[in-house]
Amino acid sequence: MRSTDRLVTLLLVLVTIMLVGMLTASWRVVLYPYLIVIGVIILLGVGARRRKDAVLLGYGIAVPVVYIALYIWLETAMADDPGSSSDLVLGLVPATAVYFLAIWPFGLLVAACYAFFHRRIMTDATTGADS
Amino acid sequence: MNLTIVSIVAAYLVVVLLIGLWATGRTKTSGDFYIAGRSLGVVVMAVAVFSSIQSGFGVVGGTSTVTAGGYGFVSGVMIATPLGFALTWLMLGKRMMNVGDVGEMYTVGDVAELRYKSPVARGVMGLTVALGVLGYLGTQVLAMGIVVAAIFEVSTTTGAIIGMAVLGLYVVGGGILAGVYTDLFQGVLMLVVSFVAFYYALESGGGIASMTRTLQAEAPDLATPFGLSPWVTIPCWIFLFSLGGSAQPHGLTKFLMLKERGSLRWGPLISGTGYAITTLMVVGIGSAVSVLTLRGEFPAMDSPDESFTQYLTDFTPPVVAGLVIAGLLAAIMSTGSSFLTLGAASAVRDIPRAFNITVRRELLWSRVAVAVLLVLSTAFALYIGNVVALLGTFGWGTFAASLFPALVLGMLWQGGTKEAAISSALIGIVLNFVLEVGGKYGWTPLPEGVVVGAFVFAITLIVYIGVSMATRGRGAEVDPHLASVIEGGSGQAPVPASQTV
């Protein structure tokens, strides 16, 4: 099986799990598979270069790993009545601070990485020449 | 009627008309009308993408949702969208530009027919866009009517007609070229007013910490990132608005307008940052109104939808209110202009070609189609507004569910088949419609909080992959040029080793 087929099969499995999460109203069963879907999409997006370029492969793996870590951090901050914390972070309750000051900017960092890796991404994945 | 506000908004309308006049002079062919003659640089394209995605629904609806339900909408929808820009550029940027080299690629239907060698696939994509356009345009008409009526103290109907007339004047002549350059002006305006509105919102609430303390004392859930939204709603929104964002045709087709590959580099960062900045306006005003209401300092409203305009008129100087309202009109008009050209493309190009009919004098008929769409959508919205509101609610979800599998995943995976593309798109349209209409009439088979668009999107992805696996090998193979593009190549035929030096 070609690597793209394997990634698409993994996508099928992950989306099926998400569908089960929706039908059972289990937010974690929707969220965490989706965070892995983001990595699958990045790897599909960089095309055949993922097999030759460790940096792009690492990009596709690192993004979901960081997202999962951030959401676990959020879950920790949301344990026990998240709206009542007396400790504010830049004026926000800790859980909201994690969301607005870490998870939100990370999406922009993913976009910044696109700019940083642009030459690699634009290289013709099938010949290695500039695309 | 406040003279300062009226003057600022009138000046804004004059500027967009002048841009439209300039663009009309430069629009000579249907290629200019639909894809701006592939002449765009990165700043114009990326700002146009974010400003057309940030609509009146996002600004007014987002603000009212924050006012009534806390940060859940922001955490789910508005924080996911910038990530969506990065994913969109990764999946489609290079591929759409390389596909654009093949020939006259103006619409999603053109791309679908090339990908699946199927006029039926083109027709289904055209139908999907046409249905979504009806809903989106209708909601823009209604929003424009309310805003223009509030500024110029006319009826909502007159307000909608004035707004749509201005929109029509620049889109009929200048097509997407007028659309993207007005988007550039409108996007920059939105960025400026968003900072100003955010500053005033924090000032009126007494600073972030003071606002949070009020929320904690009166309604602690409103201080949390998910607000009053059911928790399962948040990942549904993240999925729908980040991954599904790449299938919105008003963003997707803009890749066909770029003039050079280097332009792609900063695109997602510009679009994502721009969108994130405009989110500040929504978070700021929404939470300020919420806090001021809890403190008893905000006038009673008939509906949370009034929170945006009510806040501006009561809590900011007229100059700021005028600029922010002009920014709101910009959000509405930039989305409306994109959808007018998309609707014209479906009517003049995609649907006729699905029946093997090629329209002669395409530019002329495109202009006629825009004018007809303007009149129809205005009449449709004003006289059967409830149907329009219904169509508007599932526009984003229908595009995600029906266009993503065929057009986005299909451009990443050679294994996708035309049977899969057609069936997943049709299932997306029907299931979204049935579940959304059912919801309006009390039939809600999904658990509370599950977003219909996200649920249908998951189903169409499964259908597309499953049907593709089942029907693989039955139809025509992907041609070598396109196969190379899908694998991340340039689309040029590889030079055989024997011919290299």
Image (tube, coloured by chain):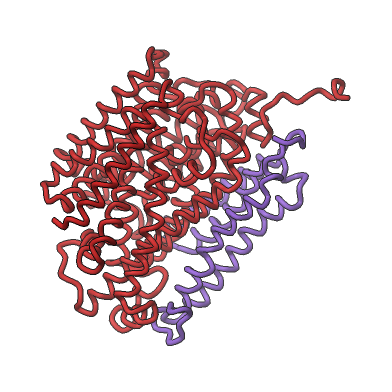
Against B465, residue B448 (above or below) is below
In this view, which residue lies farthest toward the bottom?
A86
Residue B150 locus on image (x, y percent): 16, 53
> Left of A15 or right of it: where is B50?
left
Residue B365 locus on image (x, y percent): 33, 19
Residue A77 locus on image (x, y percent): 50, 77
Q: Quadrant of the N terminus of chain B?
A: bottom left
Residue B49 seen by the camera: yes
Counting every numbered tag in the picture gives: 0
Please name the color used to draw chain B: red
Q: In the depicted view, which residue is nearer to us: B408 or B313?
A: B313
Against B356, residue A1 (above or below) is below
- Image quarter of residue B71: bottom left
Residue at 43% from the left image edge and 34% from the top image edge: B425
Against A28, residue B160 (above or below) is above
> Left of B231 or right of it: where is B310?
left
Against B234, residue B243 (above or below) is above
Residue A10 locus on image (x, y percent): 62, 48
Residue at 27% from the left image edge and 71% from the top image edge: B290
- Letter of the purple chain: A
- Image quarter of residue A84: bottom left
Q: In the depicted view, which residue is nearer to us: B31 or B1?
A: B1
Q: In which quarter of the image is the C terminus of chain B?
A: top right
Residue B469 seen by the camera: no
Residue at 30% from the left image edge and 71% from the top image edge: B288
> Left of A74 or right of it: where is A24?
left
Q: In the depicted view, which residue is nearer to us: B343 or A112?
A: A112
- Image quarter of residue B78: bottom left
